[in-house]
Amino acid sequence: VTDWVERVLAGDTRAAARLCRLVDDQAPGYREQLRALHRVASPAYVVGVTGTPGAGKSTLVDRLVSAYRKEGRRVGVVAIDPTSPFTGGAILGDRIRMQRHFEDPDVFIRSLATRGALGGLSRSASDVVHVLEAWGASVVLLETVGVGQDELDVTRVADSTVVVLAPGQGDDVQSIKAGILECADVFVVNKADRPGADATARDLENMLALGALSLAAVQAAGGHSAGHSAARLTVAAGGGSGWTPPIVKTVATTDSGIDELAEKLAGHRAWTLTEEGHALRAERTRSLLEGWLREELGRMVADQLGPELAAAADDVLSRAVDPHGAVEALLARFRAR
Ligand SMILES: Nc1nc2c(ncn2[C@@H]2O[C@H](COP(=O)(O)OP(=O)(O)OP(=O)(O)O)[C@@H](O)[C@H]2O)c(=O)[nH]1
Ligand SMILES: [Mg+2]
């Protein structure tokens, strides 16, 4: 069992693939193995790439892989395979778009299914990132479609998040859900060869100038991402310079703008190592852990109180008890265990 760990640490790609599968299956003992890796692996720079469906995320990731490979770095790619109705054949598409890297022994590409990710998608993504770090990746690119909260949470595993938009998708900036925009450390307006790219970039600039992103974020946050956006506001209000996401125009298909994107990412990476940046990362990690804690607690409650919850529902419907009273009674029983 520890054999796998040793082999992954020695940079063995097949062992890394094997360990990823054990993690996927949550095979017995996988957490111990991850813990062993986590203790000794050097942290990779993790870049989240999210945005609207079809904006060119995979093409962009493919180009970033090339850019980082030119620097001689080992690169990991984790593509979240959206089984959502938005994008059907994502895996096949990704394989085609990243084809030339499949042959490269210093690139490790791994897909993660969004459905059936026991324990939450962000947790699976984080686990796989740790395997790739141990394998020797110094940078890990994490692609996910920003369609749901679960997918967006994945970006909190990242040190820097790129939000990719494209013109002419019928989604002017105002109509994109605030949750996506709020994740951005760097914006990319891809498909700059298409009409409307300048307008999209201008819209983003205006929103940033108005501070509308932070405000929109707080309003849209509701419960889920409140921690995330509150941290952003705190950073902005803390007297520091904060971080204003730069906007980069790219044509991923022709490699245009990729160097500039890599530069902006390096700039953000450097900022995250400042005191301010560190505070934001700490807040993201805190809210990530809080999310995982909620999941575990939710599972515990469902496991322990499932039948009683159903009985309580009957009691509430028959008016034997009021809803608040029912919840209080259930909680009291849960605590007593
Ligand atoms: N014209 C143009 N087309 C592009 C550009 N970048 C990507 N595309 C094309 O846009 C389509 C979608 O690209 P992908 O990279 O698969 O986009 P994606 O965001 O990963 O898509 P999903 O993962 O399915 O949401 C492909 O046909 C690409 O060739 C670009 O800069 N300009
Ligand atoms: Mg894709």
Image (cartoon, grey):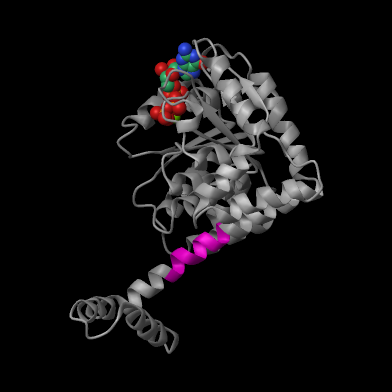
Q: Is residue 286 above or below residue 221?
A: below
126 within the magenta span? no
Image quadrant assignment for residue 250: top right
295 within the magenta span? yes
| Residue 286 visible to the viewer | yes
Q: Is residue 55 above or below residue 33?
A: above
At 34% across and 74% down in the image, what residue appears? Answer: 303
Q: Which corner quadrant holds the C terminus?
A: bottom left
At 43% across and 89% down in the image, what residue appears? Answer: 336
Q: Which residue range is magenta in the image? A: 288-297
* Relative image position of residue 102 (x, y in whole percent): 49, 27
Q: Decide if residue 275 is on the left or right side of residue 195.
A: right
Outermost residue on the left side: it is 318
In the image shown, does 68 or 200 lie closer to the viewer? 200
| Residue 251 visible to the viewer | no
Q: Give the main secondary structure, helix, strand or loop, of the magenta stretch.
A: helix
Ligand 2 rendered quadrant: top left
* Relative image position of residue 225 (x, y in whole percent): 53, 52
* Relative image position of residue 278 (x, y in whole percent): 74, 50
In the image shown, does 57 or 147 lie closer to the viewer? 147
At 36% across and 79% down in the image, what residue appears? Answer: 324
Image quadrant assignment for residue 36: bottom right
Q: Is residue 6 above or below residue 300?
A: above
* Relative image position of residue 316 (x, y in whole percent): 24, 79
Total numbered labels: 0
Q: Decide if residue 107 is on the left or right side of residue 329.
A: right
In the image shown, does 243 or 108 lie closer to the viewer? 243
Outermost residue on the front side: it is 210
